[in-house]
Image (cartoon, rainbow, N blue to C red):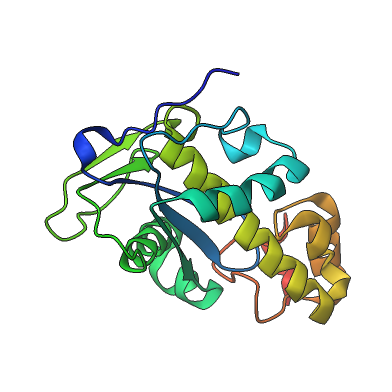
Amino acid sequence: MPLLPNCNTCGINEAGCDEAGRGCLAGPVYAAAVILPDDFHHQWLNDSKQLTEARRDKLRPIIEAEAVAWAIGVVSAEEIDRINILNASILAMHRALDGLDVRPGAVIVDGNRFKPYGEIPWTTFVKGDGRFGNIAAASILAKTHRDEYMRGLHKEFPMYAWDVNKGYPTPAHRAAIAANGPCVHHRMSFRLLDNQLTLF
């Protein structure tokens, strides 16, 4: 696997941003902002979707220990329903940037949509999580922190098997919604069932 560049040239502390959970039926959307040191490299560093859960979990403490700064932003299911998932994903990234201990000189974002964050220059990159180390690191932290949260919610709502599906729209998750109805953590603005009219 080729080593991903950190895109932190000239000492500007460039933050990479990515989100996790955008396509889920339940739970919050998470985002991470990560500033990596110029000399950070790891052979596994890549888009979180290209890694096994075991490798993501092993990379998380390495990234958190060695990053110049990192932070997580969260937007709840209730907020998602109110402002829509695109705005919620961007808000989660802004909240992650708010949490950084080091002010970034620039921001790079996975995808093709973002909104200005103060006066800090920003650029979007389609599939940036497979192109730049700091976005890849953000994708890993967003994914692992969200998965951890969903495993915690599973203990309260075991009928939905969120420890396995993490809130994504698997057939088993939809079947559990059909059998038990939605709960407070479901995104009611999403199509929870194939035939939405059968929900109520």
Q: Nearer the viewer, residue 91 or 185?
A: 91
Asked if one can make out residue 171 in the rendered structure from this viewpoint, the answer is: yes
Q: Nearer the viewer, residue 29 or 172?
A: 29
- Quarter holding residue 166: bottom right
Q: Nearer the viewer, residue 167 or 39?
A: 39
Name the residue: 73% across, 75% down. Answer: 182
Name the residue: 72% across, 40% down. Answer: 55
**Percent position (x, y) of residue 20?**
55, 53
Asked if one can make out residue 20 in the rendered structure from this viewpoint, the answer is: no
- Quarter holding residue 125: top left
Image quadrant for the C terminus? bottom right
- The residue furthest left is 119
**Percent position (x, y) of residue 21?**
58, 55
Name the residue: 40% across, 39% down. Answer: 111
Q: Nearer the viewer, residue 102 or 134?
A: 102
How many labels were placed on the picture?
Answer: 0
- The residue furthest top is 2
Q: Is residue 152 left or right of residue 185?
A: right
Q: Is residue 14 left or right of residue 171?
A: left
Q: Is residue 71 left or right of residue 154?
A: left
Image quadrant for the N terminus? top right
**Percent position (x, y) of residue 123?**
25, 38
**Percent position (x, y) of residue 25?**
65, 61
Name the residue: 42% across, 63% down. Answer: 84
